[in-house]
Image (cartoon, helix red, strand yellow):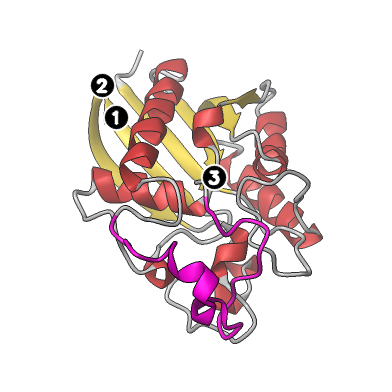
Amino acid sequence: MSDITVVHLMRHGEVHNPDGVLYGRRAGYHLSELGRQMADRVAEHLQDRDVTHVVASPLERAQETAAPIAKVHGLELATDGRLIEAGNVFEGKTFGVGDGALRKPGNWKHLTNPFRPSWGEPYVEQVVRMMSAIEAARDAARGHEAVAVSHQLPIWIVRSFAEKRRLWHDPRRRQCTLASLTSFTYQGDKLVSVGYSEPARDLVPAHLLAGAKPVKGKSKAFGA
């Protein structure tokens, strides 16, 4: 058996969210029709890969993204709570560019420390749980490949940790597009490389691509 194992951290596809709510860990947010197309595209992209384990965050959008990948490989979809979205005090609110959310005094108390951050789950805690989930997926797919479907912020944070970057960052510069793959390659238990790809890039709305200019009334945070 090969001692090379690859764990693909996948961000879920686009979510149906017409009201622009920062949904975070809230239940009831499912993939849009475009999001389902994204999930199918990645399943097609991975169909000839040696995937032996598929696992997802318990949230509906992650489960629905992972399902076609598990199906194409004839695998049972596993669930790991450690892959869940980061907690955020602004869940349930609209928080887009130009909506004035940052000018509301009631929100200021949550914006005092961008390094921890003060508005949500500490970055260090995200690293700990995500690394644990990645290592569990690695162990389940020893010598093969695994797909673990999660969410933008925890994926970006654990990648930043693996690549020895600071954890605090500008959210607009995260390289973690909808339905993208951040791939951790291990030799035995040692992480040897981290790669990134966007199999469904042509399906992603332009304002949601990494590095895109923010659009008034829209936010990348909605699809986290």
Q: Which residue is mark 2?
A: 189
- The residue under the point 49% across, 29% down is 146
Distance from the alpha carbon under mark 3 to that under mark 2:
26 Å
Report the amino acid beneath label 1.
Answer: Tyr
Distance from the alpha carbon under mark 1 to that under mark 2:
6 Å
Q: Is residue 106 magenta?
A: yes
Report the amino acid beneath label 2.
Answer: Asp
Q: Which residue is mark 1?
A: 186
- Which of pointers 3 and 1 lies earlier in the amino acid sequence? 3
| Residue 58 lies in quadrant | top right
105 and 25: which is toward the camera: 105
SS for tag 2? loop
Q: Residues within 10 Å of mark 1 (few under 14, many from 20)?
A: many
69 and 132: which is toward the camera: 132
Q: Which residue is mark 3?
A: 85
Report the amino acid beneath label 3.
Answer: Glu
149 and 224: which is toward the camera: 224
